[in-house]
Amino acid sequence: MKLEEAVILRKKVAVFSTSWNADYLYQFLSGIRAKAKEEDTDLFIFNTYGDLEQYKDFNRCEYNIFRLPKLEDFNGALIVSNNIGSAPWVEELRERILDKGLPCIGVEQDIEGIHYMGTDNYSAMSEIVNHLVLVHHCRVFNYVGGPYHNIENILRKKAFKEALNSHGIVYDERRIRDYSYRRQNGVQAFEDFKKLGLHKTDAVVFANDNMALGYLSAAIKAGLRVPEDFLVTGFDNLSAAETFSPRVTSVDRARNELGYKSMEQLLGLMEGKEYPKYVFTPHSAIYSESCGCSDRENRPIEEFRRNIYKNECDNEDFESELNHLRLSLLENQSMEGFYQNLVDFAPALGIDKFCCRMNSDEFSYDFESEGLSSVKGYPEKMDAFGLYEGIRIPKSELQTAGLLPAEFIPEDGKPHTYLFSPNHCSGRNLGYCMIMDNLHIVKKQRLYNLITIVNIAMEGLRQNIKLIKMNEKMKEIYRKDSVTGVYNRFALKEKGELLFQENCLAKKKTLVMFIDMDYLKSTNDVYGHEMGDIALKTLADAIKNTLPQESYFCVRYGGDEFLIFGTCEDEDNAEELKNSIHDNVSKLTAARHLPFKISVSIGHTYVLPGEYRNLEHHIKAADEDMYKEKKITRVL
């Protein structure tokens, strides 16, 4: 079934996501998938890890996956990409979506002209601050925020300030600092407050859990205790915050429900229903140990611990198989070996349906283009290979616009989920991978780790191909005569022996022809050695232009001596070849307006399949025949 036919039968939704936290994304995507299955809708998820690495080329290649799909092939879209560096890419995506008139929802991000669904950041932060003031009687606060221009940070910081104002608490601007949502930013915040002498406080309110965890780790290392010395609150209720000791008070954004509701509303928009611009989903404050509250009576501790153990075992097994894959891929010397290793190891990683699309242009090393960054987007055609339920999909070249080989669009009447991830390294877009009907790979950074290993292996393979071709080029340079461009004596034994072996097996005759330029010394003496080199180049070009087929090759044997080797069944062909060389030498001499004539003496010998001795023996025979001709010519 063609992709276009599948579009008619089932709705298709494109999800553009950036994974700032793997478990958060997994729960959100699980909610989307649950609703999509209910409504017989295929999901195409274009996921990036932009901003996880602080390199411009890395982020450019990550977000390039947003350019992959043709939006006209989809019925709706969800954008889940509010990372710091994603703004220009989301804006480009917004323009494309509005241009196509595609129903779309921005999840947890306010995008002009597009519906919003997400947490009410203002009210959620207000609840946290009110709790600290009313329940724990806090009066001195520090606030650690995300990026200054990030809309979520703006709303949370505004709620923080206004909640304090509502209780008559005057906040100190020195105690309010913006960072970048990362765990190390929390560590930096603690050091910054400590240097200012502002680390002694009643409570530190964080705009997310990551920074709270970093701050807590630094404070505990410095000998402080939480909640005894100060209270801490986060935002997002990540699993890392839940398992930390003390467990972090946070805001649960009901990620699974958010995904479900987002998909539900998008499907409504696709049907022409109307909704308000802003729709807020439920959230709940989780008051726990880091703010002095205890929720242990509400937590099934034994089950919680068993789940942690199971997850650790699963992750250990996955990482072990991933290491095996990494070692296997790095040993590859060919594209075919790379394909085979991925196919062989995928099932052990829990992947039974996947497809890789590779930009073959990036693997066909070109000395002139090396170092240039790849153009944006993807080429019109890309190689494809993969695995579908134990059956290997052989490599083939397909149109990129089709996204997938036909094998991955089954006629089973069921909705499916396709997860796309970009492959790149060193600023070059190498292709992309697609994993079908497997969202579990997103958990615990498994997908990120897998794609990272594949990317490194792809670059290693590309560099290996580069090295092989560089060696081939160096070998070719080593085997070529610098003056004439034909082969030199270093190539003689290799190519000559090979030709004789092939002809012996095929029971064919081998022609050995010896050509000597007449009066080269006189040309050098009268016109100079530069003109002598031009004469040699002219003769070599005339010979190359005369050779009848690829099985013939020419070698500069000495100063003014050349050899021709070739397969020749008819002995009359040798005389025709000699005459053609004489004619072409005359024509090329005239065409290049040389101030002298070039004449040559030519001898040859035939070697029958059973008569081969060694190269030098047959070259000597052709040389002797050449001298016979030279004597005759000089007599005449």
Image (cartoon, rainbow, N blue to C red):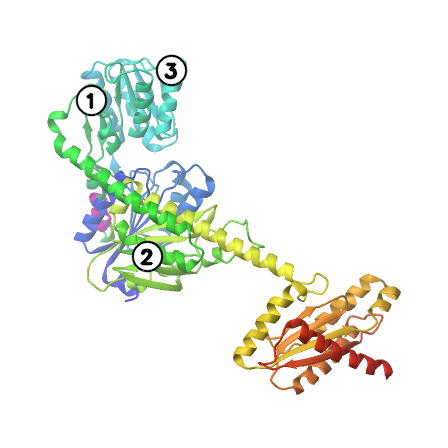
Percent coordinates x, y for residue 94 in the rendering: 37, 46
Image vertical order of residue 430 relative to residue 240, above or below: below
Give how far apart the Cα atoms at labels 2 and 3 are.
53 Å
Disc marking residue 194: 3
**Chain-order first, disc 2 or disc 3:** 3
Percent coordinates x, y for residue 449 in the rendering: 34, 43
Image vertical order of residue 191 relative to residue 272, above or below: above
- Residue that badge 1 annotates: 289
Q: Is residue 22 visible?
A: yes
Image vertical order of residue 332 relative to residue 396, above or below: above
Query: Is disc 2 surrounded by few (<14), some (14 to 19) or many (20+) residues within 10 Å?
Result: many
Residue 234 inside the magenta-drawn segment:
no
Residue at image position (32%, 53%) is: 434
Asked if residue 597 lies left or right of residue 371, the reply is right
Q: Nearer the viewer, mark 1 or mark 2?
A: 2
Query: Dominant secondary structure of the magenta stretch?
Result: helix
- Residue that badge 2 annotates: 343
- Amino acid type of disc 1? Glu
Magenta residues, as a range?
Answer: 260-268
Of 624 and 242, the residue lying toward us: 624
Q: Is residue 70 visible?
A: no
Q: Quadrant of the C terminus?
A: bottom right
Image vertical order of residue 36 relative to residue 402, above or below: above
Q: Secondary structure at mark 3?
A: helix
Label 1 close to label 2 by CB (< 8 Å): no
Percent coordinates x, y for residue 25 in the rendering: 27, 41
- Amino acid type of disc 2? Val
Residue at image position (19%, 56%) is: 40
